[in-house]
Amino acid sequence: MPAITHHTPDALLAAYAAGSLPQAYALVVAAHISLCLECRAGYEAHLAGGGAVLDAVAAEAVSEGLKSSVLDLLDAPVAVEPTYRRDGVYPGPVMEALKGKPPSWKSLGLGVRQSILSSDREGSARLLYIPPGQAVPDHSHNGLELTLVLQGSFSDDTGRFAVGDLEVASQDLEHAPTADPGAPCICLAATDAPLRFTSLVPRLLQPLFRI
Amino acid sequence: MMQTSPKISPQTTWMLAVRDGRDRAAFAALFDHFAPRLKGFIMRSGTGSGQAEEIVQDVMLTVWRKAELFDPARAQVSAWIYQIARNRQIDVIRKENRPLPEELGEAPGTEPDASQILGIEQEAGRLKQALARLTPDQREIIERAYMGDLSHQEISTLTGLPLGTIKSRIRLGLERLRHELKELR
């Protein structure tokens, strides 16, 4: 894999390590850390920061029976949780969000497709499939938009983003990202804007995306 | 050169005995050390004593069950347990699983590198000293940040702990692990 040049900013790694990120952003950061050794090191450094806090906090005595009940449970059978491994271009956390299935792509027109992974009050995460040379659909977001490239690449005024690169776009960044020639570009994107359209209002979808 | 001959901490020694030997006495020692700290940590964010103990129980059981994922070349025990505790707290609050990075896996059959483990422990020790040297106000903010009480917007203005050197150390451990895993394939 070519070197990753656009990384997760340290403040986002700190917020992710502390568990303060909305779920959609956390998914993108977890996927980026899965691909990027540099950001994994930064994330684990923040876990060390959390460990220092855990070590320094005032202890609270636990109930007398807690230890024995934990010791009694050590051999209790546990339901095996499914683990989701990387599959093709999709890192483990994305496979988990897909529940191990391939993305269910919905057309947005002009060859652009999306597969919504999650959408709630805090934000939304989705996969985008953009044919070479096609503009990435525009969409409104109030705060940060995180875009992680999983296949191909795209470019905008701020630079070129290839596999593993994370673009962090603030609200005021006016950018017109376009998929580069070559393989179709597949991205994982998260915003803090809930996706409003449902199957009941499919006609609203395209104006919303201003394609 | 080091003037003293540092030793691997009891916590790491216990954790390795749990990981490699399923050692119950070592696990009991880890429980005695970490359970009251975990309870204090969890209650600081406003969780009641009863629910805090339920989370402590889940965290300590995860320490036992997922021990094979503990890598002393990358994390001190407190950092590893911190991660488990935050994951559990978030899963309880959100009632859905927090997205986690892929596990790198362990490199079976390789001896732990004592100098790398000691390096991580020394850096973690320096981090604790740095935390202790902060003003009470600064320390309070760092604690609240790592307890998950600050939003990501608030964290973005945080002037944090000096994490650069421990990050370099962790990165060494990660690169060695990646190298070993590659050779296994």
Image (spheres, rainbow, N blue to C red):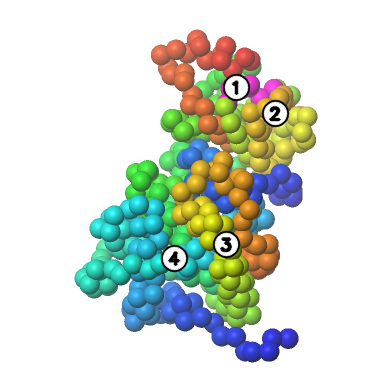
Q: Sort mark 4 into few (<14), some (14-19) or many (20+) by Cα contacts within 10 Å.
A: some
Residue labelled with disc 2:
A173
Residue B24 vertical placement versus A175 (above, below): below
Label 3 to label 1, Cα distance in Å?
44 Å
Q: Which of the two marks, 1 or 4, is nearer to us in this view?
A: 4
Residue B179 seen in the figure: no
Q: Which of the two marks, 3 or 2, is nearer to us in this view?
A: 3
| Mark 4 / mark 2, whichever is N-terminal | 4
Q: Sort mark 2 into few (<14), some (14-19) or many (20+) by Cα contacts within 10 Å.
A: few
Asked if residue B157 lies in the magenta stretch, the reply is: no
Q: Amino acid at mark 4?
A: Val
Determine if marks 2 and 1 fall on one subunit: yes
Q: Which of the two marks, 3 or 4, is nearer to us in this view?
A: 3
Q: Sort mark 3 into few (<14), some (14-19) or many (20+) by Cα contacts within 10 Å.
A: few
Check contact, mark 4 vs mark 2: CB within 8 A. no
Q: Amino acid at mark 1?
A: His
Give the structural element (helix, strand or loop) at label 1.
loop
Q: Chain of mark 3?
A: B
Residue B36 placement, left or right of B125:
left
Give coordinates of residue B128: x percent, y percent: 56, 69
Residue A137 placement, left or right of B150:
right
Q: Amino acid at mark 3?
A: Thr
Give coordinates of residue A123: x percent, y percent: 49, 32
Instruction: Tell me where the magenta segment starts and ends, as one range.
Output: A135-141
Determine if marks 3 and 4 fall on one subunit: no
Label 1 to label 4, Cα distance in Å?
44 Å
Check residue B5 in the rendering and tell me which mark sits there, or answer none. Answer: none
Check residue B135 in the rendering and tell me which mark sits there, or answer none. Answer: 3
Residue labelled with disc 4:
A57
Determine if marks 4 and 2 fall on one subunit: yes
Residue at point 51% right, 11% down? A204
Residue labelled with disc 1:
A139
